[in-house]
Image: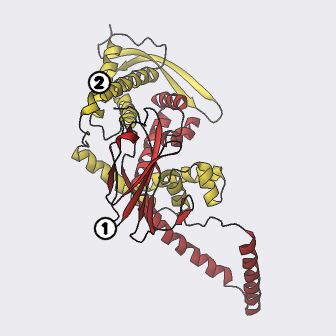
């Protein structure tokens, strides 16, 4: 008999190669804690993107989703028809939609939500952001130009290419290379 | 290092350029793909920093672009004799005059701001709120103050211009009539221009997009 914190799941690994997709199916036993540790950051990302970081309830929504995932896993509701990632994605999407529906009804006459961010999180984010900003500022002009036009001005790849007199492909290459350079700089 | 073809969609996803079905498909994918999720987090961080501090990066960029071009010019002319110099100068002048008459304005290396027919080289204006997807119609738009004696023109768009107004404050209340026209699920953008008391364009914000997820 399995330990209550261990579940049998089928995990589908999607390995996206250059010209093909290789799918590996792996059936095994996984600790629920490991599943939570793995998927919590992904759920958090999706929730923050959907609700916005200024929404004070985003953390509660993430907690509710993870509790829901644990309950369903323990009750054997995951049957392996899809991957565990898809299973958790489905629960996440539904909860977000429900939350938005509830909020639009409840908050129709409520004051604007105040900004929420713990001081520790702000400090950590700010420090890291400063480091990254310095790294971006130290890039060569041709990389900064493309980041500025593509991310800051929100122009399309074609429009950036036209402004800088390069091909759209070159725009993508510069963005990707800038990212690699920044990764190197931040590791130092 | 493992690669995933789907990483090509990361920028479009983060910049809200994917349609709803593609967005859902990509979201499900990164719930299953460690490579993509890791890259997604990194890229999101970079975009956030650029959106917050883009103006500072641009100013540094302009100075460096000018500095970088100087040594190249010096090396180019270092090996010429006086006769070659004179010939080069005359040829350059002739070509320059010909170019002025023939070619349209080309984009310089240093970015300018283009807003319809306005072209301004100068500071950018940072928008504060709303700058990301929101779950209800905004009642107020906020932006960074450009100082005293400045008039701001704010414009709100969906597929076309929805509303425009001017103010001397660094925020403006959205009229009820405009809020009633905003629909859940639709994408909007807004932009602010700052003018001096003499009517000169001082700075422009980028056009920031947001999607209205819900409606009050």
Q: Which chain letter goes with mark 2?
A: A
Query: Where residue A71 sits: x, y (%)?
Result: 31, 15
Query: Where residue B165 sits: x, y (%)?
Result: 41, 53
Q: Nearer the viewer, residue A29 or B122?
A: B122
Q: Is residue B148 above or below residue B26?
A: below
Q: Is residue A183 above or below residue B83?
A: above
Q: Is residue B46 above or below residue A34?
A: below
Marks 2, 1 in one chain? no
Query: Where residue A114 sits: x, y (%)?
Result: 24, 42
Tag nearer the camera, 2 or 1? 1
Looking at the image, which residue is at 51% across and 25% down? A13
The residue singled out by tag 1 in the image is B148
Q: Which chain letter goes with mark 1?
A: B
Looking at the image, which residue is at 73% across and 81% down? B92
- Residue at far top of view: A1
Q: Which mark is residue A74?
A: none
Q: Quick check: B30 left or right of B4?
A: left
Q: Which chain comes out red in the rendered image?
A: B
Q: Colour of chain A?
A: yellow
The residue singled out by tag 2 in the image is A64
């Amino acid at each position: 008999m399995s330990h209550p914190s261990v579940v049998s799941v089928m995990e589908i690994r999607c390995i996206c190669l250059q010209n093909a997709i290789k799918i590996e199916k792996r059936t095994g036993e996984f600790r629920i804690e490991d599943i939570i540790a793995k998927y919590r950051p992904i759920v958090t990302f999706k929730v923050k993107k959907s609700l916005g970081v200024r929404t004070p309830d985003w953390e509660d929504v993430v907690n509710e989703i993870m509790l829901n995932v644990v309950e369903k896993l323990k009750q054997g509701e995951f049957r392996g028809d899809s991957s565990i990632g898809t299973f958790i994605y489905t629960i996440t999407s539904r909860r977000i939609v429900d939350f938005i529906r509830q909020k639009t009804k409840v908050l129709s006459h409520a004051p604007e939500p105040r900004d929420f961010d713990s001081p520790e999180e702000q400090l950590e984010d700010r420090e890291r952001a400063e480091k990254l900003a310095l790294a971006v500022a130290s890039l060569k002009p041709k990389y900064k130009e493309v980041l500025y036009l593509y991310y800051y001005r929100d122009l399309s790849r074609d429009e950036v290419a036209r402004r800088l007199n390069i091909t759209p492909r070159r725009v993508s290459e510069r963005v990707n290379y800038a990212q690699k350079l920044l990764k190197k700089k931040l590791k130092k | 290092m493992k690669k995933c073809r789907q990483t090509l969609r990361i920028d479009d996803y983060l910049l809200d350029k994917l349609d709803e079905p593609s967005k859902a498909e990509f979201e499900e994918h990164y719930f299953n793909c460690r490579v993509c999720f890791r890259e997604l987090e990194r890229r999101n961080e970079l975009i956030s920093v650029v959106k917050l501090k883009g103006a500072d990066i641009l100013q540094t960029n302009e100075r460096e672009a000018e500095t970088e071009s100087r040594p190249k010019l010096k090396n180019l002319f270092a090996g010429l004799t006086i006769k070659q110099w004179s010939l080069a100068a005359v040829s350059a002048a002739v070509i320059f005059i010909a170019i002025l008459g023939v070619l349209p304005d080309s984009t310089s290396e240093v970015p300018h701001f283009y807003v319809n027919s306005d072209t301004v080289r100068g500071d950018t204006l940072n928008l504060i709120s709303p700058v990301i997807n929101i779950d209800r119609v905004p009642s107020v738009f906020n932006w960074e103050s450009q100082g005293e004696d400045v008039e701001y023109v704010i414009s709100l768009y969906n597929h076309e211009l929805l509303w425009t107004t001017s103010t001397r404050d660094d925020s403006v209340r959205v009229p009820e009539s405009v809020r009633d026209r905003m629909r859940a699920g639709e994408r909007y953008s807004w932009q602010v221009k700052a003018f001096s008391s003499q009517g000169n364009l001082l700075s422009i914000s980028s056009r920031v997009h947001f999607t209205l997820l819900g409606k009050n």
